[in-house]
């Protein structure tokens, strides 16, 4: 993956390299590549471009990039790459339009949707993020597990005789919030008083709050917190539950503006808190200008 960076024209060489990476993102890559190839057939004279979701994280700190695995595995490329780069870039651009101070300060971004990750940005550059080699890592998502004890997977392989495909299906499609409550629809979970639904929501909120605190630790403090994604942007109740667990960091929401879905939602006097609707399509369009 090391040579897949910077926006560029999508040619057959790049398509072939992206085909090789399907095992790293089985929920995303096949669909995206199929769409690109279908578009080639439909508009054979059009030029296609590609921007890499990992590019935003090219500036990860060495202690974040390097995973604690044997050197031979690191040489195979088993390291932290991070994802949601287009989403984080868009969120950073939007907040900077309101407060340019975020480009010089310490910010933690929580992108919460079908996939979820938290990102530490210092001086406008990504320094750490919760997803690692694949989009499965980090905090739980609606159907994805997030980080697990590797020993649990070894147990399933050895004692339950699950094969790699069964593990992948379970971790990608039946884990996370769905593994606890039977589904991952946050709108339904928040309205459901049942114990499993409430456990799923509480676990989700706690893990996100813990990740925000961890990201702030890596960059030495916190000046901004930014929520985005289908859940992060549209679930004020969940934002409130997450921020309540971070009061010791000086975070405090203004309930009225949070409930109204305003862009800046903090009470003042501490780190600023933002709620943004990202525009990944604009990030892709801007990236195309770089190679056209």
Image: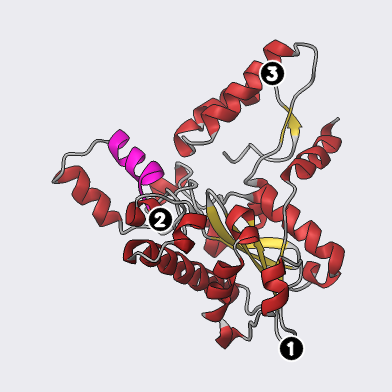
Q: Can you identify the residue that label 1 sits on?
A: 269
The kind of secondary structure the magenta stretch mainly shows is: helix
Q: Nearer the viewer, residue 62 or 16?
A: 16
Look at mark 2 in the image and give the residue it sits on: 177
* Visible residue check, residue 61: no
Which corner quadrant of the image does residue 44 belong to? Answer: top right
- Figure quadrant of the N terminus: top right
Can the viewer see residue 127?
Answer: yes
Secondary structure at badge 2 equals helix
Could you tell me which residue is drawn at 48 percent across and 68 percent down?
Answer: 205
Count neighbours of disc 3 (C-alpha within 10 A) and say few if under 14, some if 14 to 19, many if 20 or more.
some
Query: Which quadrant is home to the C terminus?
Result: top right
Q: Secondary structure at mark 3?
A: helix
Q: Is residue 28 left or right of residue 154?
A: right
Mark 3 or mark 2, which is nearer the start of the sequence?
3
Q: CA distance from mark 2 to mark 3?
A: 35 Å
Alpha carbons under labels 1 and 2: distance apart: 34 Å
Q: Is residue 273 above or below residue 48?
A: below
* Extreme residue toward the left, this view: 159
Does 40 sit above or below residue 4? above
Mark 1 or mark 2: whose residue is earlier in sequence:
2
Q: For mark 2, does the 10 Å Cα neighbourhood hold few (<14), some (14 to 19), or many (20 or more) residues?
A: many
Q: Which residues are magenta?
A: 164-175
Question: In the rendered image, which residue does mark 3 sit on?
Answer: 39
Give the alpha-carbon distance from disc 1 to disc 3, as whole Å.
50 Å
Provide residue 109's location: percent of width, then percent of height.
Answer: 64, 64
Residues tagged 1 and 3 counted as in contact (Cβ below 8 A): no
Residue 262 appears at what percent x and percent y? 75, 67
């Amino acid at each position: 993956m090391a040579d897949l960076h910077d926006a560029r024209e999508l040619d057959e060489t790049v398509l072939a390299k992206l085909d090789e990476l399907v095992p790293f993102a089985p929920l995303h890559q096949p669909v995206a590549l199929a769409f690109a190839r279908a578009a080639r057939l439909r508009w054979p004279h059009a030029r296609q471009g590609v921007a890499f979701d990992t590019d935003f994280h090219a500036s990860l700190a060495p202690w974040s990039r390097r995973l604690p695995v044997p050197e031979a595995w690191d040489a195979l490329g088993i390291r932290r790459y991070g994802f949601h780069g287009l989403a984080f870039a868009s969120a950073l651009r939007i907040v900077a339009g309101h407060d340019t101070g975020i480009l010089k300060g310490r910010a933690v971004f929580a992108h919460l949707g079908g996939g979820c990750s938290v990102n530490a940005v210092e001086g406008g550059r990504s320094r750490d993020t919760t997803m690692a080699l694949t989009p499965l890592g980090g905090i739980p998502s609606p159907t994805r597990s997030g980080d697990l004890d590797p020993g649990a997977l070894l147990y399933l392989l050895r004692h339950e005789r699950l094969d790699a495909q069964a593990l992948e299906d379970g971790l990608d499609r039946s884990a996370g919030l769905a593994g606890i409550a039977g589904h991952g629809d946050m709108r339904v979970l928040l309205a459901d008083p049942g114990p499993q639904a409430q456990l799923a929501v509480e676990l989700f909120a706690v893990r996100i709050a813990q990740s925000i605190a961890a990201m702030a630790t890596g960059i030495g403090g916190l000046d901004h917190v930014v929520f985005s994604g289908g859940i992060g942007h549209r679930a004020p109740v969940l934002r409130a539950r997450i921020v309540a667990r971070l009061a010791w960091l000086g975070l405090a929401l203004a309930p009225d503006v949070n409930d109204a879905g305003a862009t800046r939602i903090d009470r003042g006097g501490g780190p600023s808190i933002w709620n943004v609707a990202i525009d990944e399509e604009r990030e892709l369009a801007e990236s195309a200008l770089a190679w056209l």
